[in-house]
Amino acid sequence: MDCKRIIVAIDGYSSSGKSTMARRLAAAAGYRYIDSGAMYRAVTLKAMRLGYVSADRIDADAICAMMDDTSVDFRPSADGQITLLDGNDVEREIRTMQVSALVSPVAALPCVRRSLTRMQQAFGQSKGIVMDGRDIGTTVFPNAELKVFVDAGPETRARRRFKELIDKGENTTYEAVLANVTERDHIDRTRAESPLRCADDAVRFDNSDMTLAQQDEMLMRLFDEAVKRHVD
Ligand code: CDP
């Protein structure tokens, strides 16, 4: 049977494991994976480098103007993919706590959201894509054939992210990571433009007590069902 290619939208809270889920599903399905959070992080990194955002100020006009000549793309690599900002590899830098600390205010700017939403929609033009983020099922692809919303308690999420950062050699504390996760949740949920929320037609689940294998199995089942529903 010739299966239709679908769009899978995976949204959820900070460090809920969405990216791991999305990456693994994309690999299993032979789909393209797009990390929309990496796009917001890359734009934030550029704004930081240009001095347009810091802990105590944000120059919205300069950031909006910057978006006209900013490109974010991805290149496959041995262990997943590399984020390219204006053609240059920024994968490592965008994952630091410095970027995490500034990304949510930048991502709340409507001009940034509109510009990145357009780029994300272009990635999904021929379907066969798994995209993770905060507003994929609500704003970027409201007609996605499968929408999943992932959650886990804040402490579980902070523990996961803290371990990831320490494994990468970053010098931080669990308390700092928990504070960042909680603050981003708040900004992402309360911003005016496409706030983080569960789409009405999304499958919602909490993965606090799930193993990776259980998570993969559940997602694969949802995926197979969604593909079947959309076969002509
Ligand atoms: O650190 P984590 O993996 O949880 O976050 P991320 O997916 O890398 O996203 C970083 C930040 O980008 C989020 O906290 C949001 O402020 C913003 N974001 C967004 O506003 N919309 C998206 N679709 C994806 C990310």
Image (cartoon, grey):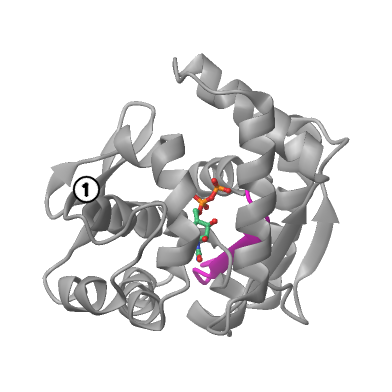
Residue 15 visible in rendering:
no
Residue that extends furthest to the front in the rendered view of this protein: 56
> Is residue 114 found inside the magenta-colored segment of the image?
no
Q: Residues within 10 Å of mark 1 (few under 14, many from 20)?
A: some
Residue name at image x 62 percent, y 61 percent = 10
> Is residue 3 found inside the magenta-colored segment of the image?
yes
Depicted 134 relative to depicted 220: above or below = below
Depicted 75 relative to depicted 147: above or below = above
Q: Main secondary structure of the magenta part?
A: loop
Which of 24/65 is in front? 65
The N terminus: image quadrant: bottom right
From the top left corner, tell me how far across and down residue 188 is, in percent: 60, 66
Depicted 219 relative to depicted 1: above or below = above
Query: What residue range appears in magenta?
Result: 1-15
Q: Which residue is mark 1?
A: 84
Residue name at image x 32 percent, y 26 percent = 78
